[in-house]
């Protein structure tokens, strides 16, 4: 069993910053990819950023230059530094990991952390 625990959300004014963290624990061979998704009220969950084992990153176009994803492989953690936050960034943010368990890979999700940006 693999568990993801994400944290770091909160209430911030527009232009402010937050740093999200996600820790993976449990029994697995490796973590191929970690990332962040978000879901605003009444909207579908959307991709925000991912980082693969080699360190290559991908970002949603609207967060490029403002958000930075990073990963600590030794600690099985992923972070999302969010700067210049805007009200449209308000959402529940979910950590996601693609984990190899034995011969198979599985997707796991954190419980979500609320980010609210006031104007």
Image (tube, rainbow, N blue to C red):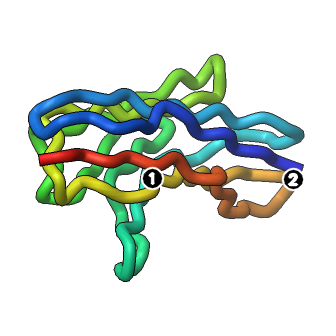
C-alpha gap between disc 1 and disc 2: 28 Å
x, y percent for residue 41: 38, 73
Q: Residue at x 79, y 63 (%)?
A: 104
Dot 1 falls on a residue whose secondary structure is strand
Dot 2 falls on a residue whose secondary structure is loop
Which class describes the residues within 10 Å of circle 2: few (<14), some (14-19), or many (20+)? few
Badge 1 vs badge 2, beta-carbon distance below 8 Å: no
Q: Is residue 107 above or below residue 69?
A: below
x, y percent for residue 48: 32, 56
> Hey, which quadrant is residue 10 in on the image?
top left
Q: Residue furthest front?
A: 119
Q: Which mark is residue 93?
A: 1
Judge from the rendering whether residue 34 lies leftward or rightward of residue 106; answer left or right. Answer: left
Q: Is residue 54 above or below residue 41?
A: above
x, y percent for residue 37: 42, 58
Q: Residue at x 68, y 58 (%)?
A: 108
> Hey, which quadrant is residue 31 in on the image?
top right
Marked residue nearer the N-terminal end (1 or 2):
1
Judge from the rendering whether residue 28 lies leftward or rightward of residue 78; answer left or right. Answer: right
Residue nearer the viewer, 13 or 69: 13
Which class describes the residues within 10 Å of circle 1: few (<14), some (14-19), or many (20+)? many
Mark 1 vs mark 2: in front: 1
Judge from the rendering whether residue 112 lies leftward or rightward of residue 11; answer left or right. Answer: right
Q: Which residue is mark 2?
A: 102
């Amino acid at each position: 069993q693999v568990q993801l625990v994400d944290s770091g959300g909160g209430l911030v004014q527009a232009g402010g910053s937050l740093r999200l963290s996600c820790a993976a624990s449990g029994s697995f061979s490796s973590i191929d990819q970690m990332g962040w998704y978000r879901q605003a009220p009444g909207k579908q969950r959307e991709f925000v950023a991912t980082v693969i084992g080699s360190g290559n990153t991908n970002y949603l176009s609207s967060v490029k230059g403002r958000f930075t994803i990073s990963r600590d492989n030794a600690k099985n953690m992923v972070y999302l530094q969010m700067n210049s936050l805007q009200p449209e960034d308000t959402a529940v943010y979910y950590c996601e990991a693609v984990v190899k368990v034995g011969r198979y890979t599985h997707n796991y999700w954190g419980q979500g952390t609320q980010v609210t940006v006031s104007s």
